[in-house]
Image: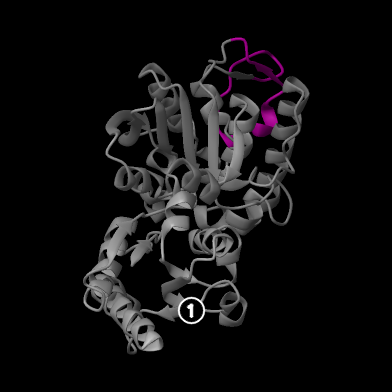
């Protein structure tokens, strides 16, 4: 039997690779003679580097000194594939994980470092770029990225303004004559939020980045004004495009300043890694993620794996640390199960995640073997 194991990361506890190994080890206790293929995946944003690094030997790790969201120098990792594709994870530069909670200042935070990563990839000879966006500390619609690429943002007197959201109300024109041309860019995005409105970047994600409630409306107004100025200058209008609001409007910025294409993060990554072919050849598929709930059906890795498995008539099962909305999920998997086997705190669950996942995989394998006997 060929078993394909295609999990996403368990955020805060397991990388996709470690999760896949734990599932394999659990299954191997029951099916020691099965052939196992490990294919850690991601659905955009954080985790894309691990997915490509783990799935291919034709990878050259790279590192670049860039600015974090607050302008401090940090070392950011990225990858260069043998075929010339650069893999970039935007949160390596503007990630919320780099900013302490008491330091968060979204109106002064910038995606400048993401632009530096793109320039580094182009300078290294990349012929195309895949950018996973998500987990950002910014809400700047890509103005920082554009500044790094050579755009200037001017006030009514023609003076240069710092490329941060605080200056959105002062911008009256854009000088894009120095905007750097880049290789084709595909953006792997795991959300469908527009730039503006109740589901937009500011109102959905602003508070977790440190934006106080009383500043929400002014931040939204600034973002809207900036988008109007960009639209008038470039002749584009991406505010309503699904994914434009991802990563604090970085999706919008990449489309506007880099002519990037936004794609379902899972489809982009799974397609680049040949996931569908591997799933079609398998006799059984196991996927997993930290949480399985209604949001899983909005482009998350387990749902993407499920759709491909169902397309090719391959049984697919899912494991998760947390289960909710099970009635919605059951129609998409042949079985779902929690890895939790007793009450415990979140800290205990995170610490024991590899062992819990391995044990859950063994329980599932026993169930499958018994159902066939």
Q: Is residue 15 visible?
A: no
Report which residue position mark 1 lands on. Answer: 335
Query: Where is residue 258 drawn, in percent x and y?
Result: 59, 25
Specify how the rendered protein is coloured. Answer: one colour
Q: Is residue 145 visible?
A: yes
- Residue 166 forms part of the magenta stretch: yes
Q: Is residue 152 above or below residue 352?
A: above
Quadrant of the rendering where the C terminus is positioned: bottom left
Q: How many marks?
A: 1
The magenta stretch spans which residues?
Answer: 154-177
Q: Is residue 148 above or below residue 239?
A: above
Q: Residue at x 35, y 19 (%)?
A: 124
Q: Residue at x 74, y 51 (%)?
A: 197
- Residue 102 forms part of the magenta stretch: no
| Quadrant position of residue 18 | bottom left
Query: Where is residue 12 drawn, in percent x and y?
Result: 34, 62
Q: Residue at x 28, y 79 (%)?
A: 362
Q: Is residue 258 left or right of residue 272?
A: right
Q: Is residue 146 left or right of residue 79?
A: right
Q: Nearer the viewer, residue 299 or 258?
A: 299
């Amino acid at each position: 039997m060929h078993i394909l194991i295609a999990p996403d990361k368990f955020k805060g506890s397991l990388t996709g690779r470690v999760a896949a190994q734990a599932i394999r080890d659990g299954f191997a206790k029951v099916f020691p003679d099965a052939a196992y293929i490990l294919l850690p995946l991601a659905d955009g944003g954080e985790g894309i580097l691990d997915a490509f690094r783990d799935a291919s030997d034709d990878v050259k790790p790279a590192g670049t000194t860039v600015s974090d969201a607050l302008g401090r120098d940090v070392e950011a990792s990225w990858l260069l594939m043998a075929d010339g594709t650069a893999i970039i994870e935007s949160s390596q530069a503007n990630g919320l994980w780099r900013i302490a909670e008491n330091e968060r200042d979204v109106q002064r935070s910038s995606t400048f470092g993401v632009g530096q990563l793109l320039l580094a990839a182009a300078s290294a000879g990349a012929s195309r770029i895949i950018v996973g966006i998500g987990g950002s500390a910014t809400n700047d619609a890509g103005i920082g990225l554009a500044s790094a690429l050579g755009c200037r943002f001017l006030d009514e007197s023609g003076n240069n303004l710092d490329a941060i959201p605080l200056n959105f109300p002062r911008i009256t024109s854009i000088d894009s004559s120095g905007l750097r041309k880049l290789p084709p860019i595909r953006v792997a995005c795991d959300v469908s939020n527009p730039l503006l409105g109740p589901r937009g970047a500011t109102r959905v994600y602003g508070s977790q980045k440190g934006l106080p409630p009383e500043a929400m409306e002014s931040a939204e107004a600034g973002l809207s004004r900036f988008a109007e100025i960009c639209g008038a200058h470039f002749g584009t209008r991406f505010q309503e495009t699904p994914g434009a609001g991802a990563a604090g409007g970085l999706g919008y910025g990449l489309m506007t300043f880099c002519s990037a294409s936004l794609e379902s993060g899972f489809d982009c990554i799974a397609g680049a890694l040949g996931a569908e072919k591997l799933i079609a050849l398998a006799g059984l598929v196991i996927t997993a993620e930290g949480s399985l709930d209604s949001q899983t059906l909005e482009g998350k890795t387990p749902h993407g794996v499920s759709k491909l498995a169902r397309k090719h008539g391959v049984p697919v099962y899912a494991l998760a640390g947390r289960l909710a909305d099970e009635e919605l999920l059951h129609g998409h998997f042949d079985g779902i199960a929690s890895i939790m086997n007793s009450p415990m705190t979140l800290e205990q669950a995170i610490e024991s995640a590899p062992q819990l996942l391995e044990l859950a995989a063994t329980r599932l394998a026993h169930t499958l073997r018994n159902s066939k006997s």
